[in-house]
Image (cartoon, rainbow, N blue to C red):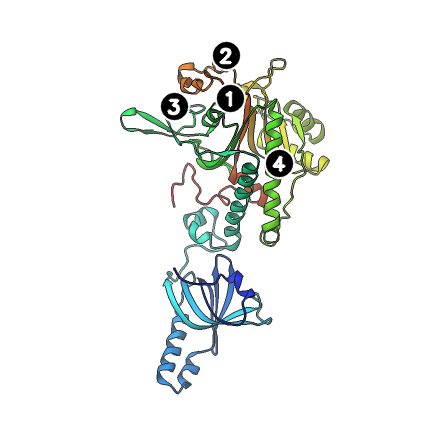
Amino acid sequence: MTHRTLIKDLSALPDGPVTVAGWVETVRDQKKVQFVVLRDESGALQLVNPATREIAEDVEDAAAAASALALTETISGLSLGTFITVTGELKHDERVKLGGLEVKVGTLEVAGASLPEAPIAADSSLDKRLDYRWLDLRQPKNALIFRIQTTLEHAWRTWWVGNGFVEIHTPKLMESPSESRAELFQLDYFDLGTAYLAQSPQHFKQMAQAAGFGKVFEISPVFRADPSFTSRHATEFISVDAEISWIDSYEDVISMQEQLLAAGLAAVKAKHGDEIRELFGIEVEVPQVPFPRIPLAEVHELLKSERGYTVPREDGDLDPEGERQISAYVKEKYGHDFVFVTDYPANIRPYYHMRDPETGLTKSYDLIYNGTEITTGAQREHRIDELLANAKDKGLDPAGIGEYLEFFKYGIPPHGGFGMGLARVLMLLLGESSIRETTLLFRGPTRLAP
C-alpha cells in the first residue's frame, strides 16, 4: 500500500520530506515555475516545481538536467483528473493562499492518467453529471455529502446500540409481497416461481418483535417499482427503520425517533458544521425535543385559516404543497424544522396500522422536515383478529398475507416503528433540490447506470 500523508494532516508536520497522492485539479505552467493543485479525499495542496525548461538546461550535471527536464515535461503533460503520487519537500509558507502550505516536487509518478477533455463541467446538467457520477463526486461539496452521511449513520447506530437496540439485516428477496403488489419488482426464482424485491423490511421488523428482540433497527436498501420522476422518489433507496416492543401508543415511537434525529444532527453539526456552512451556505440546526405534533384534521384547518391553502386531494392526505405550508407555519410559530402530523384516516394507511376504536383513525404519523415528509410511523396492530379484519377491509385476501400472519399466532407484544428515507433527510438537511444529489448512484425509471 502506498505510504502517503493526507493533505489535511500536513499542517501538523514540520518542514521536510513527505509523500502525497491524489488527482490533479489544476496546472499552471508558467515560464519560470510550474504549479499544480493536487486534491485528495481530505483537501487540496499546492505543488511547486521551479525546474522549468530554461533552468533545467542551465544545470551543469547532465543527468540532473535530464531529470529536471523530464519532470518539467511530465507536469506540462498532466491532464486534469490524472492521479499522481508526489514525493517532495513540505514547506510552511503563509503567503501560499491554499492552506499556507506547499510541496516542492522531487519525484512525480503518474498512477492513473486521465483523458485530456473532461466529459462534464461545473455547469453541466444534473442528468449529465449523473452519467459521470464518479467525476461529479470529486467536487468537494458532493464528496462532503457522503462524509456527512457516514457521521449521521454512525451517530444513529451509536444511539440505538446505547439504548439496547439490536441491528438486523432482513432479506431483500421475498416469497410474497410485503405490502402491495402495485410497486413491486418481480423476478424468476429457480423452481419456486416468482420472487419479489422487498419494498420495506416491515414484516421482518415485526417478526423480530415476535422473536422477543424488543428493539431493532436496520439501514438497508429497499425497492419500489414506482414510475415517479419527482425530486424525492427513487426505485432503489436506503431506508432507515426501527421497531420497538411494549409501547403504549405511537407516542413512544415518536419519542424514540425525535431523540434519534436530535442525536444525529448534533453529531453532524459538531463534525461538519463549518464545512456545511462554507460549501452549502447552511447552518445546521439541532432540533429541540419534543418536536411539535399536530393531528392531520387540525393541519387541514390550520392550512385553510392560517395559510389560505386547501389541500386538493380527495383522500384526505397532504400533498407536497400542503407539507410545505404546514412546515412553514410550524417554523413561524414554533421556530422548528420538524413537525409530526398524526392520526391519519384508515383509508390512506396500511392494514397493519392500529386503529383507534373510538375515532376509527389510525395510530400513525408522518414526520415532515423542512417542508417534505421523511417518515411514516405507527403503532402496529398486534391482535390477529383485528389485523385480519383490517386486511379484509382493505380488500386483501388473507391467503396472500398468510406467511405474515403466522408471526401473530404464537404471541407478540404491542409494538410500533417507523421507516425513514436517508437520501431525503440529507437532501433537506443540506438544502439540495433532489435526492439525486444525495444518493451515491441514483436509480429511477430511466436510470440503471452507472
In the foreground, 298 or 405: 405
| Left or right of 250, for residue 208 | left
Tag 4: amino acid: Gln
Res. 401 image quadrant: top left
Q: Secondary structure at mark 3?
A: loop
Q: Say which residue label 1 marks.
A: 350
Task: Give the quadrant of the N terminus.
Answer: bottom left
Q: CA distance from mark 4 to mark 2?
A: 33 Å
Tag 1: amino acid: Pro
Q: Secondary structure at mark 4?
A: helix
| Residue found at the very far left of the displayed protein | 191
Q: CA distance from mark 4 to mark 3?
A: 34 Å
Assess disc 4: are there few (<14), some (14-19) or many (≥20) residues with their C-alpha within 10 Å of its C-alpha. some
Tag 2: amino acid: Asp
Q: Is residue 383 above or below residue 79?
A: above
Residue 385, which numbered label?
A: 2
